[in-house]
Image (tube, rainbow, N blue to C red):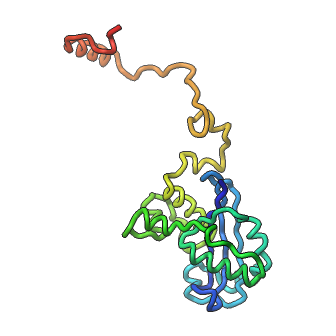
Amino acid sequence: MREIVLDTETTGFSPEDGDRIVEIGAVELFNHLPTGNTYHQYINPERTMPAEAFEVHGLGDEFLADKPVFREIGQAFLEFVQDAPLVIHNASFDMKFLNAELGWAGLSKLPAHQAIDTLLIARKKFPGSPASLDALCRRFAIDNSAREKHGALLDSEILAEVYLELVGGRQPDFALSSGGTAAGRAGSGIGGQTRKRPAPLPPLLTEEERKAHAAFVKTLGDAPLWQIR
């Protein structure tokens, strides 16, 4: 099953008021494991950056001036996501902006049912508890120390870990999957057949402990079950 974990950064809160997307980051999962395939794009919003938005993500007018506008990258973005479910934290916000940009570019919009909202999942699973991305990182002991400012690709990578916890726990080899292979993991018991040890490990009991145990067994009276033939 292919899924895309996605995040955006914008100039504000409302495309109806002229706010635009300035960054898209996305991570591809297959069967809940990262494939190493990502999408990352900075976008020229064709407007000045409000100071409040700059404080959130640090993307200023000078940095974005030479980046492509959305209509130049929109089709490539659609080709990356295709019809895969889009895992987004507070999905209504990002989907609102993405569909506004796609509409302005004359491209097909994303259907609402394509989005999986991790914010709603977290609120249902932990009612009354904080459900921000940072709060969920603390709950699941996920390291987000590199998140000094919001960044779409970093946030999507962190959200991928949060999402896997929300839906039932991270895969045992989640952190190793991008660097290992199925063959390399085959003998580990994770995703493959376990192998028998060629020679049994030596006992950890000392001779003194073994004799003490034997003396204790004799005090039990009837023969222990494991000695009955």
In the rendered image, residue 91, in percent from the top left (x then y), is placed at 57, 72
In the rendered image, residue 172, in percent from the top left (x then y), is placed at 54, 46
Name which quarter of the figure residue 44 lies in: bottom right
Q: Of residues 43 and 113, which is closer to you in this image?
A: 113
Name which quarter of the figure residue 157 lies in: bottom right
Look at the picture and state if 34 lies above or below 44.
above
In the rendered image, residue 165, in percent from the top left (x then y), is placed at 49, 56
Q: Residue at x 49, y 52 (%)?
A: 169
Look at the picture and state if 134 lies above or below 203.
below
Look at the picture and state if 112 lies above or below 157.
below
Q: Of residues 108 and 196, which is closer to you in this image?
A: 108
In the rendered image, residue 7, in percent from the top left (x then y), is placed at 61, 71
Look at the picture and state if 20 lies above or below 199.
below
Q: Of residues 135 and 222, which is closer to you in this image?
A: 222
Q: Residue at x 44, y 68 (%)?
A: 123
Name which quarter of the figure residue 124 lies in: bottom left
Total marks in image: 0
Residue most extreme to the top: 229
Query: In which quadrant will I find the C terminus?
Result: top left
Q: Residue at x 28, y 14 (%)?
A: 224
